[in-house]
Image (cartoon, grey):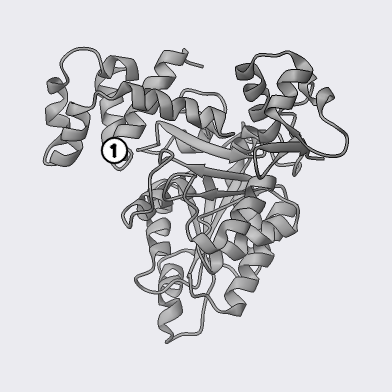
């Protein structure tokens, strides 16, 4: 792992240029380190930005380090975790794509889930009952086989896939196209909480960044980049899911598609993918053999044992939690005599590991 200063400057570049992933990678390649990017006159990087004047001005004029430190510290205090590309827990497969995020923010049950084999499932927001049922069933079956489901928490297929994973008591990761403090769509607040309690919420966008149309195609490269393969369910000809399929192919990932009745605009994109060589899927059996073979290319990835993480185990703070009932940070400070910063750090680890749960009003209880 890099030192804390290098991690902070990786986060700085990610925060300033979060809408320009390719530029961020080029800056690091040009300088060799994130901290070096901010040493000396930034004008030396002007040619890298080309005609992207808005990005250049954001980078050239940035000097609000106090605000950035506030965001950095707030993320840690708000039970989220910032994972930089140099960290061991950063998703190995995502690190290999052309334009990986330099830093991601996660919230949920343990960073270790980021390096178990994933399969992406995306599709129509207006999927019919058959499409949602199939996404639900395949997600559950994949989880039972040790895979994690990655999707975008959108209406329709995405939500069905997350729910299928949760129903199977498996792992699922929701990738946001905004900061983790903005639930989108807002109607999925309850679903996001269930995912946070049992899986992970993940974003490359800093806390405070609102949803924006161009951020969702950008988000899709993370869904495909983390996955051994991506399943497309009921995609129309101009569906955003086809962007994910295109990105998956560019990243060397497998593409699967569920066929639909010919002549329907709602499945024209899915059927087109099959005509172009995507694997036709009618049940999970059509996928398992292929994703198992893909997994052999990534020997460091370990199949999931569902929620058997070790994050947080052994913490002395747990002994000060009541077996039943709730406790606040102030109460823990009085009971333990520990410094506030140390308690907040332990609480973050325990929450990420699922050992404790956060309740409204910044109260906590034993999670298992």
Relative depth, front residue between 256 and 103:
103
140 to 1, vertically: above or below: below
Q: Which residue is mark 1?
A: 22
Task: Judge left or right: residue 91 versus residue 133.
Answer: left
Q: Position of residue 193 (x, y in %)?
A: 63, 51
Task: Judge left or right: residue 199 versus residue 207.
Answer: right
Q: Position of residue 181 (x, y in %)?
A: 49, 45
Q: Quadrant of residue 36?
A: top left
Is residue 359 visible from the viewing direction of this image? yes
Relative depth, front residue between 144 and 20:
20
Relative depth, front residue between 298 and 332:
332
Position of the C terminus, as image quadrant, is top right
Which residue is located at x 36 percent, y 54 percent?
Answer: 217
Q: Position of residue 351 (x, y in %)?
A: 68, 34
Q: Quadrant of residue 209?
A: top left
Q: Quadrant of residue 290?
A: bottom right
1 to 163, vertically: above or below: above
101 to 87, vertically: above or below: below
Which residue is located at x 48 percent, y 25 percent?
Answer: 73
Is residue 282 visible from the viewing direction of this image? no
6 to 15, vertically: above or below: above
Which residue is located at x 48 percent, y 70 percent?
Answer: 125
> Quick one: which residue is furthest to the bottom in this view?
263
Q: Position of residue 177 (x, y in %)?
A: 42, 50
Which residue is located at x 63 percent, y 19 percent?
Answer: 340
Q: Secondary structure at mark 1?
A: helix
Number of dots carrying numbers: 1
Question: Alpha-carbon neighbours of circle 1 within 10 Å: few (<14), some, or many (≥20)?
Answer: some
């Amino acid at each position: 792992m890099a030192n804390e200063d290098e991690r902070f400057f990786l986060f700085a570049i990610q925060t300033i240029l979060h809408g320009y992933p390719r530029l961020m990678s080029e800056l690091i390649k040009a300088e060799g380190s994130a901290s070096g990017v901010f040493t000396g006159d930034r004008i030396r990087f002007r040619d890298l930005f080309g005609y992207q004047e808005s990005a250049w001005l954001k980078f050239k004029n940035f000097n609000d380090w106090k605000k950035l430190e506030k965001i950095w510290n707030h993320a840690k205090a708000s039970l989220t975790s910032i994972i930089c590309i140099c960290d061991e827990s950063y998703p190995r497969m995502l690190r290999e794509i052309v334009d990986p995020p330099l830093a991601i923010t996660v919230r949920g049950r343990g960073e270790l889930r980021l390096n178990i084999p994933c399969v992406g499932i995306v599709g129509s927001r207006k999927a019919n009952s058959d499409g949602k049922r199939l996404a639900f069933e395949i997600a559950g079956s994949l989880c039972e086989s040790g895979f994690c489901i990655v999707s975008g928490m959108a209406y329709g297929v995405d939500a069905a896939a997350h729910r299928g994973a949760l129903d199977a008591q498996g792992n699922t990761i929701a990738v946001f196209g905004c900061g983790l403090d903005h639930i989108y769509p807002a109607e999925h607040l309850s679903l996001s909480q269930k995912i946070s309690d049992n899986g992970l919420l993940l974003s490359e966008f800093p806390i405070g960044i609102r949803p924006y149309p161009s951020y969702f195609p950008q988000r899709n490269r993370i869904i495909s980049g983390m996955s051994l393969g991506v399943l497309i369910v009921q995609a129309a000809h101009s569906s955003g899911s086809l962007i994910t399929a295109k990105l998956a192919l560019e990243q060397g990932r497998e593409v699967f598609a569920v066929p639909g009745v010919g002549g329907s605009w709602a499945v024209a994109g899915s059927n087109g993918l099959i005509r172009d060589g995507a694997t036709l899927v009618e049940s999970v059996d059509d996928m398992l053999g292929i994703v198992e073979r893909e997994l052999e290319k990534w020997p460091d990835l370990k199949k999931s044992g569902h929620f058997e993480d070790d994050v947080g185990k052994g913490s002395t703070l747990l002994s000060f939690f009541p077996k039943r009932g709730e406790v606040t940070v102030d109460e823990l400070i009085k009971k333990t005599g520990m410094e506030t910063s140390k308690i907040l750090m332990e609480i973050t680890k325990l929450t990420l590991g699922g050992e404790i749960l956060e309740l409204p009003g910044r109260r906590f209880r034993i999670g298992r």
